[in-house]
Structures are given as C-alpha cells and as structure tokens.
Amino acid sequence: MSVFARRIEVATNIAILCAFVLVAGLAADRLLGRSPDEASEPKVGERILLPGMDWSRSERTLVLALSDGCHFCSESADFYRKLVPSARQRGLRVLAVLPQPVSSSEIYLKQLEVSVPEIVQNSLDALQVSGTPTLLLVDRRGRIERAWVGKLDSAQEQQVLASVR
C-alpha cells in the first residue's frame, strides 16, 4: 500500500471516529437531560394553572412542590418544620403539591413531621417545576412572586423566611 493511500485511510478513520464521538455526545446529552434553555423552571410573573385551585382565597400562598421519593425533600424537612408555621402565622396559605396520591403524600409528610394544611396531587409540570424540592410564593392571581429550586443552603433558607414575613 502506498504512503498516500495509508494517509487517506488514517485520515478517514480519524474523521469517522470524530463523527462517532460527536453523535454519541449529542445522544447522551439528549438522553441524560435537557439543556438549560429547555428546562421547565418556574418563572417569576408567570401564572400557575392548577385545576380547581382558587388562588384568591389568600393574598399570598406558599407552595411546596415535593415528591416522596426525593431525598433532598426529606433532607429539607427541618427547614419546612420551621417555615410552614412561620408562613401560617403571617397569614399565608400553605399548600403542598406532590405527584403521588394525597393519601401517600399525607403519610410521607407525617413521617417528616411537616404539617401542611393543604395537600394536592398534581403533576409538577403544572407548576413549571422540573425538580424537587421547589418552593413558590404565589400571589392571589396565581402569579409566581418568588421561586427557590433545590435543597437550599442556610442563606437561601433565611431569604425564604424573610420573604414570607
């Protein structure tokens, strides 16, 4: 085989390998998660459309979007045990939205010792939530005033507590 043919063969193999790596990377990105542009995150000012929900029952509502299989939700239970009574003392309505049936959600929250007066079963997509836990402060028109996503650090927890006051 001539030197020229060998170089062509090596260049072709490198091009095929590069193409394979590119395609595999794109496939993995699509399978493992959405890009930040595509992620469904709650946006301040957007309206939440939960079927049957009357947001006007309270000036503001604190929504806890949780899931009983979420370890970050469970790890945040100490904070929720402080947050829920604090929000209620200040006249906020407190609502937990979980994708599981209400009966199993009640058991889950009871295990965490988090006493939420209203529990609703619904897809978290309706809240524009793609990850749990997510906390939303919602006004009487159902518009998001504030949103906190994920397990919060102590500074973020203080920010939430200040927002419900």
Image (tube, rainbow, N blue to C red):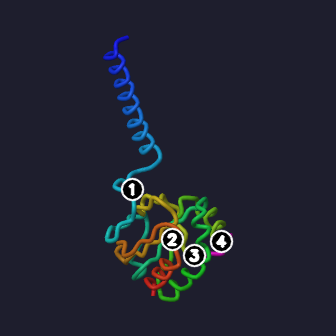
Q: Which residues are magenta?
A: 110-114
Q: Where is the C terminus found, in terms of image quarters?
A: bottom left
Label 1 element class: loop
- Distance of label 4 from label 1 (alpha carbons): 29 Å
Label 2 element class: strand
- Amino acid type at image mark 2: Leu
Label 3 element class: loop
Are the residues tagged 4 and 2 within 8 Å (C-beta)? no
State the residue position of label 4.
112
Are the residues tagged 3 and 4 within 8 Å (C-beta)? no
State the residue position of label 3.
116
Residue 58 within the magenta-colored segment of the rendering: no
In front of the other: label 4 or label 1?
Answer: 1
The 10 Å Cα crowd at callout 1, few under 14, some 14 to 19, many 20 or more, is few
Q: Residue at x 54, y 73 (%)?
A: 118
Q: Nearer the viewer, residue 137 or 116?
A: 137
Q: Nearer the viewer, residue 99 or 74?
A: 74
- Distance of label 3 from label 4 (alpha carbons): 11 Å
Label drawn at residue 64: 2
State the residue position of label 1.
39
- Amino acid type at image mark 4: Leu
The 10 Å Cα crowd at callout 4, few under 14, some 14 to 19, many 20 or more, is some
Q: Position of residue 146 (x, y in %)?
A: 39, 75
Residue 112 within the magenta-colored segment of the rendering: yes
- Amino acid type at image mark 1: Ala
Q: Is residue 160 left or right of residue 108?
A: left
Residue farthest along the top direction in this orientation: 1
Q: Nearer the viewer, residue 133 or 88?
A: 133
Q: Residue at x 63, y 62 (%)?
A: 104
- Distance of label 2 from label 3 (alpha carbons): 9 Å
Are the residues tagged 4 and 1 within 8 Å (C-beta)? no
Are the residues tagged 2 and 3 within 8 Å (C-beta)? yes
